Image (tube, coloured by chain):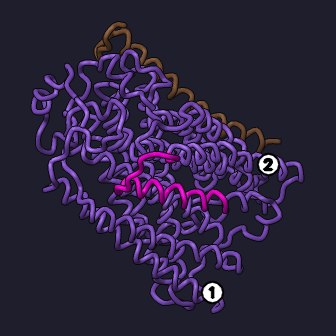
Amino acid sequence: MAPASPNDPERARKVRRSAIALGLVALAFYLSFILMSVTGYRS
Amino acid sequence: MANTNHAHDTHAAHDDHAHKPHGWRRWVYATNHKDIGTMYLIFACVMFFMGGAMALVIRAELFQPGLQFVDPAFFNSMTTMHALLMIFGAVMPAWTGLANWMIPMQVGAPDMALPRLNNFSFWILPFAFTLLLLTLFVPGGAPAGGWTLYPPLSVQAGDSFPMTIFAIHLMGASSILGAINVVVTIMNMRAPGMGLLRMPLFCWTWLITAYLLIAVMPVLAGAVTMLLTDHFFGTSFFSAAGGGDPVMFQHIFWFFGHPEVYILILPAFGIVSEIIPTFSRKPLFGYESMVYASASIAFLSFIVWAHHMFTVGMPLAGQLFFMLSTMMIAVPTGVKVFNWCATMWKGSLTFETPMLFALSFLFLFTIGGFSGLMLAIVPADFQYHDSYFVVAHFHYVLVPGAVFAIMAGVYYWLPKWCGRMYNETLGKWHFWLSTIGVNILFFPQHFLGLAGMPRRIPDYSTQFADWNMVSSIGAFIFGFSQLLFVYVIWNAVRSGEKAPARPWEGAHGLDWELPTPAPYHSWETPPSPQLIARGAEH
């Protein structure tokens, strides 16, 4: 197996992508709960 | 003592002193996982003592019936601030500190995946808690409506309201960023050969905790954002007068709040799953079942939230669903308790301080779990709700549960961190004083709750006087015995005996394959597959 290097560009890309994806998940939870409350409020 | 000769050692001896920043820059600009972990742990310790001082104000006031020391409004601020400080300021940062220290060392990574984000996550916290603590000095005083921030009471607070909301947002941002870092580190930075099912349980439980954090901290942020707009921008999310629903806040809050309980306790399961095998000199019984049990607990934590609010009224089907789903949590938790007992069965047990704290965790957390089962029963909960029985329940889960596990982890890993041993006699004194104190403090609160004493009151009927006095004595024993903890750690770091590379002969894992003290940069050269295989002898 190839040795892991913290500066490996492929790994750096994966780290960045997964961090952004998780951040978007968090943002989606934040917005969706407010949205649910807004729609519930209107009904 | 194990042989720790491997390629890494030669690098470590050099790197321990090379490229290491000095002075204040080392801490303010810190990107090293160990430095950031240390800062998290020190911050958590400071918050633990501040929150503890507030708890002692509460217990001093409740020592006798009648109003002794503080007025009721300040008493309510103390209960609210104590909870916020202990949950968000002490226990959560302590776990993040331990994660920072141990996860890279345990998965064979040189550092966390996102070191600058790590620095940012930590440095948000001092600002958040300064803001929160400043509310003690603003007109109207600190928030006093309970850490649950239920409207309409919380929205009627004075100048403290926006400060509290902003502080909670900051704490939430810090937790989410820290959690993202943990997930990304574990998923991308594991050494070649370190499969997911070879990771130590502490990494597993933290991975699951991090997913929980990413899912539920934004929900809390959403809830408090809506409180803010209700207060300042004329919306009526939770105002019945404007067509909103205050009970909806409770649903949203507890959708965050119940997983939060598992955020506080899952890493404790991980630590105990490392300490018990070490001091039993046996592999952990049922490693995979422990992983699946942790994941099951995390999943179930999303579908039990309304058991916190049975008394607001809900359809019978809802009551049954939340009662039964809550009871189902006992199954994976029971698997864990069984596995810990089976690990000890016929083991060669010794009782050093980390093991004593882990065993105390096992007994006392189980008591908290059983009282939780009692609270899950809807008709019984109608009786227990908002009584001291609930206070006893969650303190058994969080103090001899989460806090004892943090202390167990600190005693366990301290020799690896600083290269020095703590004083075992003083460690045992700390353990016994804490265990005796915590039981004198919280066990009588079961009796008070069953007898009908409500929570969050500064004064009470004389029928509750005796057990309150006992509880307060326990609080002072427990509180002051924690000063001994600080002394033991300080003494070890300053002048403890030099620790061997593997101070606990039964310890396994990559963290124990590093030299002692752990070098400033760990695993710059990835560990060999043989080393990983040896460490993965669960």
Q: Is residue B326 above or below residue B471?
A: above
Q: Nearer the viewer, residue B151 or B70?
A: B70
Whether the magenta-drawn stretch holds residue B360 is answered as: yes
Name the kind of residue labelled 2 in the image: Leu
Alpha carbon of mark 2 to alpha carbon of mark 1: how far?
33 Å
Name the residue carrying label 1.
B464
Q: Position of residue B437 (x, y in %)?
A: 44, 73
The stretch of residues the image draws in magenta is: B344-371
Q: Examine the rendering and report whether any part of residue B221 can be seen.
A: yes
Q: Position of residue B121 (x, y in %)?
A: 37, 39
Q: Would you identify the image quadrant in which residue B37 lies?
A: top left
Q: Secondary structure at mark 1?
A: helix
Q: Nearer the viewer, residue B115 or B322?
A: B322
Q: Would you identify the image quadrant in which residue B403 lies?
A: bottom left
The residue that appears at 17% across and 40% down in the rendered structure is B26
Colour assigned to chain B in the rendering is: purple
Which residue extends farthest right? B316
Prevailing secondary structure class for the magenta stretch in the rendered image: helix
- Quarter holding the C terminus of chain B is top left
Whether the magenta-drawn stretch holds residue B213 is answered as: no
Q: Which chain does the residue under circle 2 lie in?
A: B
Q: Examine the rendering and report whether any part of residue B170 can be seen.
A: no
Q: Nearer the viewer, residue B283 or A27?
A: B283
- Quarter holding the N terminus of chain B is top left
Q: Secondary structure at mark 2?
A: helix
Name the residue carrying label 2.
B324
